[in-house]
Image (cartoon, grey):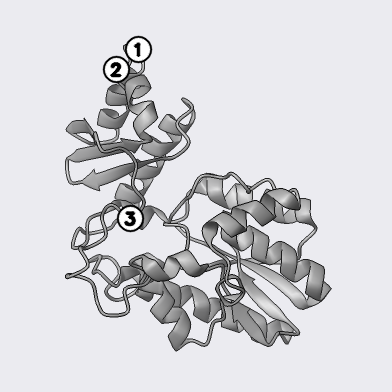
C-alpha cells in the first residue's frame, strides 16, 4: 500500500492493524482517532495509551455525529452516516500528510453481521487489510497475542449509539447516562456487558456466567440504585446474557448489503 491513514479506536482489530502498518510502513502509517460523544472516554484514553506504547504516530480528529442530518433519529443505517463522517476526516488527514490510502480494521467476520458502515467504507474507497488477508476475529486475537499486544483478549466494544433501538432519538444526555452506567458495572468487574437504553428502562446485558453475580445481594442493590440515579425508572437484566448487536434488525428488516463498522 505504500502509505496509509488507519482508522484507530484502540479495539482489537484496529490496534493490530496500526501495529502492523507501523512495522511495515514506519512514518508512512498514521493512526487517526475519531473522538466524539459516542466514544466512551475510557476507550479514548485507552487508545491513546496503547498507541503511545506501540510508538505509533497518531492524531485525534473530532467528529460531530449529533450534528449530522439523520443521525440523531437513529435510522437503521445510522452507522453508515457516522462512518462517512469519520472516513471523510481520515481522508482529509491522509491528504494533509501525503498518504495514499485510508484503511479500517474490518475482518472477515464482519461480512456476516449487520454492518452498514462497511457500505460507507466501500463508497469512500476505504480498504480493509485484515479482511483482504483473510483474517477472522479469532485470527486477529491469535496474532495479537503472539506479538504481545495488550488488546489480544480485550472485550469487544462499540460506540455508545449502539445501545439505542433504531428509531429512538440519540442525545448527548442519553449517551452520558449509558456511559456512566457501564463504567459503574466495569468498576465492579463486569467486562463484557452493555446497558441498552429503552426509554425509562435500562436493559443490562452481562455474560451468562456473570448473571448470578450481578443478582447477588449487595451488588444488585447498588447497580439498581446507580442506574436509577441516572434517570431510568426501571432496571432489567437480560436473561439471555450479553449479545453483540442485540438491537440489530432481523435479516428481513436489514438492507441488502447487511454490513456495518467495527467492534459492535
Q: Quadrant of residue 42?
A: top right
Q: Residues within 10 Å of mark 1 (few under 14, many from 20)?
A: few
Q: Quadrant of residue 70?
A: bottom left
Q: Which residue is mark 2?
A: 221
Q: Are marks 3 and 1 in contact (CB under 8 Å)?
A: no
| Residue drawn at x 76%, y 53% as measured from the top left | 147
Label 2: element kind: helix
| Residue drawn at x 54%, y 49% as measured from the top left | 43
Circle nearer the viewer, 3 or 2: 3
Question: On screen, 236 above or below 67?
Answer: above
Residue 213 shows in this picture: yes
User: Relative to the observer, which residue lies in front, 195 or 58?
Assistant: 195
Percent coordinates x, y for residue 36 in the rendering: 47, 60
Q: Which residue is mark 1?
A: 218
Circle nearer the viewer, 3 or 1: 3
Label 1: element kind: loop
Percent coordinates x, y for residue 192 in the rendering: 44, 39
The quadrant of the picture occupied by the N terminus is bottom right
Q: Which residue is mark 3?
A: 245
Percent coordinates x, y for residue 11 in the rendering: 56, 55
Side (left or right) of 74 relative to 49: left
Q: Residues within 10 Å of mark 3 (few under 14, many from 20)?
A: some
Q: Residues within 10 Å of mark 2 (few under 14, many from 20)?
A: few
Q: Specify the farthest residue to the top.
A: 217
Percent coordinates x, y for residue 156 in the rendering: 48, 49
Distance between the alpha carbons at the discs numbered 3 and 2: 27 Å
Q: Earlier in the sequence, mark 3 or mark 2?
A: 2
Label 3: element kind: loop
Q: Are marks 1 and 2 in contact (CB under 8 Å)?
A: yes
Distance between the alpha carbons at the discs numbered 3 and 1: 30 Å
Amino acid at each position: 500500500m505504500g502509505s496509509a491513514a488507519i482508522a484507530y479506536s484502540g479495539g482489537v482489530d484496529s490496534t493490530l492493524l496500526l501495529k502492523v502498518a507501523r512495522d511495515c510502513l514506519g512514518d508512512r502509517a498514521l493512526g487517526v482517532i475519531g473522538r466524539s460523544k459516542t466514544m466512551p472516554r475510557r476507550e479514548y484514553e485507552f487508545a491513546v495509551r496503547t498507541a503511545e506504547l506501540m510508538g505509533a504516530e497518531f492524531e485525534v480528529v473530532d467528529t460531530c455525529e449529533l450534528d449530522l442530518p439523520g443521525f440523531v433519529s437513529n435510522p437503521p443505517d445510522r452507522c453508515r452516516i457516522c462512518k462517512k463522517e469519520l472516513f471523510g476526516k481520515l481522508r482529509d488527514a491522509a491528504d494533509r500528510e501525503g498518504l495514499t490510502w485510508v484503511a479500517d480494521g474490518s475482518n472477515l467476520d464482519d461480512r456476516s453481521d449487520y454492518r452498514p458502515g462497511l457500505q460507507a467504507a466501500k463508497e469512500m474507497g476505504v480498504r480493509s487489510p485484515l479482511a483482504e488477508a483473510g483474517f477472522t476475529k479469532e485470527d486477529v486475537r491469535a496474532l495479537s497475542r503472539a506479538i504481545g499486544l495488550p488488546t489480544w483478549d480485550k472485550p469487544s466494544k462499540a460506540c455508545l449509539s449502539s445501545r439505542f433501538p433504531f428509531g429512538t432519538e440519540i442525545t448527548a444526555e442519553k449517551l452520558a447516562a449509558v456511559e456512566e452506567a457501564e463504567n459503574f458495572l466495569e468498576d465492579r468487574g463486569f467486562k463484557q456487558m452493555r446497558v441498552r437504553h429503552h426509554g425509562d428502562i435500562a436493559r443490562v446485558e452481562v455474560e451468562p456466567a456473570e448473571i448470578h453475580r450481578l443478582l447477588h445481594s449487595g451488588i444488585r442493590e447498588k447497580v439498581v440504585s446507580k442506574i436509577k440515579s441516572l434517570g431510568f425508572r426501571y432496571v432489567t437484566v437480560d436473561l439471555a446474557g450479553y449479545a453483540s448487536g442485540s438491537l440489530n434488525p432481523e435479516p428481513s428488516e436489514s438492507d441488502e448489503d447487511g454490513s456495518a463498522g467495527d467492534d459492535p
